[in-house]
Amino acid sequence: MNQLLSLQNSIRLNCQMTGHFELLKLSDITEERQTSVSRAAGPIKEIPYNAITFLNRALSPTSVISISSSLAKRYQTVLGANSNNGISAQQYYSIGSGQCGRVFAYADDPWVLKRPNSSPDPLWNDYIMHSKLRNAATKHPNIAALCAIIPKVQCYISNSNKPWWDINLAKFPPDYRSPSDLLVTEYIQPLSAPIRFALIDLFCPPEMQETQMQSPGYRDCLARIYLGANASGRTNRFFSLRNFKLFHDRLQRLGLDLDALVGKMASSMALMHFGAKIDGRDVEFVLGSKVEATEKISLEELERMAPCTDTLHPTAIVEPGPWHYCRRRVEMFVLDFNQCRSIEMNKEGMETAAEAFVINDPYCPRPHHADEGIRNLWVYFCQVYREMAVEVGGPELGRETIDELVGWFLESIDARVRARKSREVGTE
């Protein structure tokens, strides 16, 4: 544990900004400085480090996290087998689970496998609905560029695919060594180690911090964006970095651009409704990492180089596979489409979409909230959603029809939220 605290402290003490983007570079430190940091290791809160400032910069889409080669190696050495939850690099390991099933990753593979808990029907629905949204993004690339990133869909593997299971069955944990249907999609990489350290610093109760640093879910950190609710008043007895909740007030505290987050959500919902024609039921909006490609060398530079010059960028160190580079940028992703349903472009379809919106977790802002900031974000959400709906659905349906459909959707949300609040008041 002393090693881990020493590494944590060295990461904190070596954050700086350089380059065209804001590059949060975790440079190497001297043995003397490392020793002095190790001697000073104590409660995390005593380290001279501003987690809020760091997260404000690190979670910005113009920032790139970079870990120098020796520090990346030291990080891997300290965490050892824990970096893959104690599973060999030659095996699939669980990175999370939900109502639909459990998700498995492979150390050097850019894809994940979602395995159903029981019936494969929700998994197949996930495949269809996810593919519909990917197809809509292809048809509307300009709108898709404004949305949360939609992970790629690779394929569906059935439990009767004997050749595949003969090769791969033994790679799964013992409790999952039976053929099952699998959905293969793009791996959303977790938030980088420096961000995870900072989240623990800022939001985890001090008495739980050391435990969280060593927990199996520590490395599998995606942050859910809850712009429709606040964390204040909620119990803090349970903390986990896996599916960590960044509530509206926490995002405000970090000084992030909330309008930009709302814009991505509203654009994504418009693409779902009017492009893919799905209701968005139970989808999630999360912050994860995307590999930042190393800088391309110009042709002029290449022609001046000696033959066989090594052009691998010094920060392109694997963690843990050859595709998993240390230069990463935080992005918003939308995922989990297993509960989505197809909708018609009529009032009934918009009512279905509104129902899905209200029963979902509070990723998007909501009307009639006690917090004025959330109410203002709802107004902005409606504005962007309306504009994007016209862009996506207007050419097919016409402006007048789109305005009517959008009105039904937003009015139904308003009515449902007011009805829910009335019921809550009546039960007090």
Image (tube, rainbow, N blue to C red):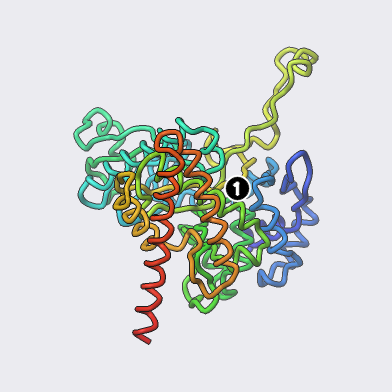
Location of residue 319 (image quadrant): top right
- Looking at the rendered structure, the number of numbered marks drawn on it comes to 1
Residue at the image position 41 percent from the left and 43 percent from the top = 105
Mark 1: amino acid: Val
Please state if 386 lies on the left or on the right of 348 as rendered.
right
Residue at the image position 36 percent from the left and 47 percent from the top = 337
Residue 109 visible in image: no
Please state if 281 lies on the left or on the right of 21 as rendered.
left
The quadrant of the picture occupied by the N terminus is bottom right
Given the current orientation, which residue lies at the most extreme bottom position?
Answer: 428
Residue 164 visible in image: yes
Residue at the image position 63 percent from the left and 65 percent from the top = 252
Location of residue 154 (image quadrant): top left
Given the current orientation, which residue lies at the most extreme front position?
Answer: 400
Q: Residue 361: x percent and y percent?
A: 42, 62
Vertical relation: 76 (above or below) 234: above
Please state if 411 lies on the left or on the right of 180 as rendered.
right
Residue 98 or residue 197, whichever sits in front: 98
Would you name the residue on which mark 1 appears? 330
Q: Residue 235: x percent and y percent?
A: 48, 77
The quadrant of the picture occupied by the C terminus is bottom left
Which type of secondary structure does the marked residue at label 1 adopt? strand
